[in-house]
Amino acid sequence: MTVDHSDDRLKDFADLVQRMRQAQQQYFRYRTKAWLELSKRLEKEVDDAIRDIFQPQLFG
């Protein structure tokens, strides 16, 4: 029996994007360094997730 994890991966990705958008909104509202750093970190995580989706590792 195989387990389809695509629903879990999609939910995880959507949660990550939602957290990124919330951090970006807080940054534009308050313009603090902390919100900017969090926004950038989450944006990198989203970019990495997108890269992993379109260029999955062959061995690893």
Image: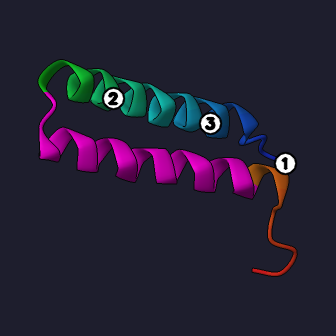
Give the quarter of the figure containing the C terminus.
Answer: bottom right
Q: Which residue is mark 3?
A: 8
Q: Tell me what residue is drawn at x 49 percent, y 52 percent.
A: 45
Q: Which residue is mark 1?
A: 2
Identity of the amino acid at label 1?
Answer: Thr
Kindly report the distance in space between the C-alpha atoms of the residues bearing marks 3 and 2.
24 Å
Instruction: Assign a secondary structure to mark 1.
Output: loop
**Among the two numbered marks 2 and 1 on one chain, the one whose residue lies closer to the N terminus:** 1
Residue range of the region highlighted in magenta in the rendering: 31-52
- Front-lying residue, 59 or 54: 54
Q: Residue at x 72, y 57 (%)?
A: 52
Give me the C-alpha separation between circle 1 and circle 3: 14 Å
Q: Secondary structure at mark 2?
A: helix
- Amino acid type, residue under disc 2 in the picture: Gln
Side of 22 where 46 appears, left or right: right
Q: Nearer the viewer, residue 58 or 50?
A: 50
Residue 16 pos. (x, y %): 47, 37
Residue at which label 2 appears = 24
Q: CA distance from mark 2 to mark 1?
A: 38 Å
Q: x and y percent of residue 41 in the render?
A: 37, 53
Q: In the image, is 47 to the left or to the right of 22?
A: right
Looking at the picture, does residue 43 appear above or below residue 22? below
Residue density around tag 3, few if under 14, some if 14–19, many if 20 or more, within 10 Å: few
Which image quarter: residue 32? Answer: top left
Do the CB atoms of the residues marked 3 and 2 lie less than 8 Å apart? no
What's under tag 3, amino acid-wise? Asp
